Amino acid sequence: MSRRISYREALREGLREALLNDPRVLLMGEDVGRYGGTYAVSKGLLDEFGPDRIRDTPLSELAFVGAGIGAALGGLRPVVEVMTVNFSLLALDPIVNTAALYHHMSGGQFSVPLVIRMATGAGRQVAAQHSHSFEGWYAHIPGITILAPATVRDARYMLASALSDPDPVLIFEHAALYNMEAELEDEGPVDIRSARLMREGSDVALITYGGSLYKTLAAAEQLSARGVSAAVLDLRVLRPLDTGAIVALIRQCRRVVVVDEGWRSGSLAAEVMARIVENAFYELDAPPVRVCSEEVPVPYARHLEDAVLPQPEKIVAAVETLLGVSP
Amino acid sequence: MIEFLLPSLGADMDEGTLLEWKVRPGDILSKGQIVAVVDTSKAAVDIESWHEGEVALLLVEPGQLMPVGTPMALLLEPGETAADVARYMRDTLRSASTGVTSAEPKQVTSAVAERRPVSPVARRRASELGVDLQGVSGSGPNGVITLQDVERAGGAVAPPKGGQDGMRRAIAAAMSRSKREIPHYYLAEPVPMTRALDWLAQENAARPVTERLLPAVLLLKAVARALRRYPEFNGTYVDGEFHPAPRVNPGVAISLRQGGLVAPALCDADRKSLPALMRELGDLIKRARAGSLRSSELSEATVTITQLGDQGVESVFGVIHPPQVALIGLGRIAERPWVEDGKVVARPVMTASLAADHRVSDGHRGALFLTELRELLQQPEALDADLSGETQ
């Protein structure tokens, strides 16, 4: 039995379920209460759960992420919403130097069961300061789990798994996906450790996550019309990476294109490629290839923004070059 | 120093595999001499030299897949010695390693000469199967040896889906390009063949069986003569511009028994006698089917003629072979009802068609061309007699 649901509604259902199931859960962040959330994810929750559990915060990421860590240490299960990943840089210190380290620095005495949600990515003409993809940076940090739900199923069910994790979990919601609607086919819990194969294929592995998933699936469809069988792997979890799933797919396809909306240099794509070369070098029939964003700030103008981001055409072209077939 | 480069033998050729050298270092080359046999996706082709000089060094090995433009050999110009070769090689390698060379093919060769690229999994599989990579030609980008190449060489798998299908791919690429780029228009005209066939019968009665003329050569000659008068159908369209060809070299479409087709050129068909054309056509068909065409024959066609012959249908509308600008289709000669002096009579008739590039010519000129062809075929003796004072 499946039902049609938007990515935004799926997130709201997940939040509501968490608030209903566990009195320790609260949501805090800028505009989450009276405004209903910058992306309207928490709309209606203030009326249902009241201001103690749906808390509007001042415009200080440093302060409210820090408060979330304190609440988690004090026994609550806070879900902190940061408006976009660009603004989360103001909270890098509490996230990287506090939340990610306390378990280690307390000799295992304290855990920080904190969940931070934030929007990431471009594609909505909101210009450079609201459009970047820094999830790859966070995936560099030991001590935190990094999730990138791309499907409505993950949007609906990843939060519960994140809340049951005793350590900090960051959830990156791609801003271009909130309005996406899809069939939710499998209800029930999802793991936050594995990648998921979204499309079978034998000629080339396309590895991606988040907002790039649908561009990659579109590219795979175009390639299929040209006789190229492309598999698509949704990483889902950026830290820890599911190296086993990546290597298994390389063994099957022998060629790989990694699609990542982050900038190329030092990107998550770079880490995926490094793991492929470390673990599956002798399985490769061609050098791994990347399709990333151009290394410039994301522009405001629509045509320039489109040109900067990974697009199905760029992915198709990369695959054709890799296979040595002319368009 | 002369670089002998792999020539392009047609718009659809971008690479070739060296099968065999026909010369050795020290040989003195003359123009037109066969230098090597190269497998294009269409056929094994004898590559001729357009240079004269002494062969100094062979740069590629049999089995090697090269892009068009790859230097295959070095020829000494008069006065040059081995020292010049050494200097050339040093300069090429240096410029390739510093990346300052302007000629891309040089980089390709020197890289290839240093180390043949083999994918990691292909290398591993080759050692598992005991395949010697020296004998394996690479099908990947830039000639990389892939897993599939090794498994094919090791007999582990049959060739992939599509089989023979370099040629199928080449035809697909050329024909798709044609239909993508060339705005074709089509015209057709029925041509009464009574006079032509009568004249041929009369001519052949006086000839030994082995020297009899087929209608095909008469048609070929007539088309070539008509093309001389209407040059906008004979040439190439390159970089947004039509280049009329100085010679009339019709490519004659020849179907191959294993499937596919080639259209090698019958050069200067407008200036050759019918017996000469007959001999050359027979030779061309034999060699096309044996897969031993010369490079010039594949690269010099200025127009294409497709004849369906006895087995064919009434008419054919062809797809132009880029960068040519026209294709003349000749249907089967068959008896048809024909109106003559107000009466319906049975006459042998052939439908001649023209597929032409509208960027270069218009239907009005196309119609005049087909009319000219029809009229030429009403005076077969003139076609035979006219040699324009040229080659016999």
Image (cartoon, grey):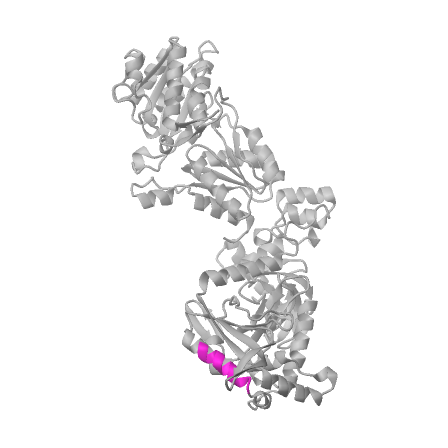
Q: Is residue A23 above or below residue A60?
A: above
The residue closer to the viewer here, A309 or B236, is: B236
Residue placed farthest to the front in the image? B343
Q: Is residue B40 above or below residue A22?
A: below
The dominant secondary structure in magenta is helix
The residue closer to the viewer here, B30 or A190, is: A190
Total numbered labels: 0
Q: Is residue A147 above or below residue B195?
A: above
Please identify the quarter of the rendering in which residue B291 is found: bottom right
Q: Position of residue A74 (x, y in %)?
A: 37, 8
Q: Residue at x 48, y 83 (%)?
A: B229
Q: Is residue B86 above or below residue A211?
A: below
In the displayed structure image, the side of residue B270 where residue B238 appears, left or right: left
Q: Position of residue A243 (x, y in %)?
A: 55, 30
Please identify the quarter of the rendering in which residue B357 is found: bottom left
User: Magenta residues?
Assistant: B367-378
For the question of whether residue B292 can be seen, the reply is: no
Q: Residue at x 35, y 19 (%)?
A: A80
